[in-house]
Image (tube, helix red, strand yellow):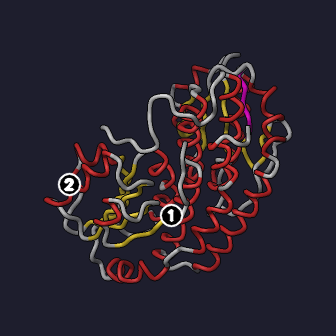
């Protein structure tokens, strides 16, 4: 099983994360930050698709500390319906693993007639159309990835996180140190990959679906975890904010219902605990995903981390779960049936 390319991609994430940190071009953003501080931008618009969009969400939250609008828009919606949000004073921040997916290419075509003030690109392919069009380029340095997004997702979290640290004029070395520590923690967690798989298998053998819920920066793992379960394991999964789940979808809870509840940031942790307890009280299954267990909740622990790096570690148990559920459903985890690595058709 460990010879599966998807498993190999999962296991190689800590090494790839270190490569992203070592290759991060801090000086690349000097002129952009000067323009930002001089008031040259009227908004920052962050866009991507799939794991690239999901991995950018913690950066969106942190950037909200700035005194200008921060927009987060799926590239397909932006290119077809919202191009007027790209003004001559917009910092357009485009995140794409390949830099050449269909929606990215369409957006670049739109930008020829409606250019932003600056185009900041985050991509793993430095010879892609996106990279060539960029005014500022932050490479992911994740190496070749052959299946479901793993290394590129973690590296997106890190590269975006470091860029925001610079933009907010926070100490860059402290953020680098935190991400290096997260890489070490991920390596220790993944060293026990087979042990985790064996522990998860009996717990989920009767699952028919899964809902992932959380708040704040945990929504990166919520959204991307649901994507991973669908893509890698062909397993019905959905991700939404814990607050949205309270507003109607809670009616789904019964003996067939299964949820992963992310502990997340301290500001809303108690709300997430109460939600997990309510799911159990109404007959559903709820698993607590956090570095701190709660005595009355089933827990899938993740390594302790800083708020900055927690999203890197929150995705790891979901990747393990995708291996287990894929095998239980008779699929080769991570193997594509209908798609390729890069989506070239809208």
For disc 2, the marked residue is 109
Quadrant hosting residue 225 = top right
For disc 1, the marked residue is 140
Q: Residues within 10 Å of mark 1 (few under 14, many from 20)?
A: many
- Is 67 positioned to the left or the right of 228 in the image? left
Q: Is residue 187 visible?
A: yes
The residue nearer to you, when weighing 338 against 47, is: 338
Mark 2 secondary-structure assignment: helix
Q: Kindly identify the residue that appears in the image at 72 percent across and 61 percent down.
A: 305
- Is 89 positioned to the left or the right of 22 in the image? left
- Is 144 positioned to the left or the right of 257 in the image? left
- Is 271 positioned to the left or the right of 138 in the image? right
- Say which label, 1 or 2, has the lower sequence index: 2
Q: Residues within 10 Å of mark 2 (few under 14, many from 20)?
A: few
Placement of 54 over or under 307, stated as above or below? above
Locate residue 338, reporting x and y percent: 45, 29
Quadrant hosting residue 278 = top right
Q: Kindly identify the residue that appears in the image at 72 percent across and 67 percent down.
A: 181
**Residue 67 is inside the magenta segment:** no
Q: Which residues are magenta?
A: 284-288
Gap between marks 1 and 2, in whole Å? Answer: 23 Å
Q: Is residue 271 visible?
A: no
Locate residue 166, reporting x and y percent: 49, 76
């Amino acid at each position: 099983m460990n010879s599966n390319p998807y498993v190999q991609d999962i296991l190689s994430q800590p090494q790839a994360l270190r490569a992203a940190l070592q290759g991060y071009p801090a000086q690349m953003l000097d002129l952009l930050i000067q323009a930002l501080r001089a008031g040259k931008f009227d908004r920052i618009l962050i866009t991507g698709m799939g794991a690239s969009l999901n991995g950018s969400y913690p950066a969106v939250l942190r950037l909200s500390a700035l005194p200008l609008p921060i927009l987060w828009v799926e590239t397909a919606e932006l290119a077809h319906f919202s191009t007027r949000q790209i003004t001559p004073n917009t910092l357009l921040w485009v995140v794409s693993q390949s830099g050449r997916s269909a929606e990215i290419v369409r957006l670049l075509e739109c930008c020829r007639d409606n250019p932003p003030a600056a185009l900041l690109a985050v991509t793993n392919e430095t010879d892609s159309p996106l990279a060539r069009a960029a005014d500022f380029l932050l490479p992911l340095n994740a190496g070749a990835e052959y299946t479901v997004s793993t290394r590129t997702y973690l590296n997106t979290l890190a590269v975006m996180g470091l860029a925001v640290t610079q933009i907010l004029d926070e100490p860059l070395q402290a953020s680098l140190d935190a991400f290096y520590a997260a890489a070490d923690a991920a390596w220790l967690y993944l060293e026990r990959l087979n042990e985790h798989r064996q522990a998860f298998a009996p717990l989920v053998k009767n699952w028919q679906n899964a809902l992932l819920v959380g708040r704040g920066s945990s929504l990166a793992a919520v959204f991307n975890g649901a994507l991973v379960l669908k893509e890698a394991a062909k397993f019905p999964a959905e991700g939404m904010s814990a607050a949205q789940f309270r507003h109607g979808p809670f009616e789904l809870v019964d003996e067939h219902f299964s949820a992963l509840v992310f502990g997340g940031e301290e500001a809303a942790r108690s709300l997430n605990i109460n939600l997990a307890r309510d799911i159990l009280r109404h007959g559903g299954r709820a698993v607590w995903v956090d570095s701190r267990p709660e005595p009355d909740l089933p827990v899938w622990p993740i390594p302790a981390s800083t708020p900055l790096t927690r999203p890197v570690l929150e995705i790891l148990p979901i990747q393990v779960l995708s291996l287990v559920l894929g095998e239980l459903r008779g699929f080769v985890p991570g193997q594509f049936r209908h798609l390729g690595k890069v989506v070239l058709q809208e």
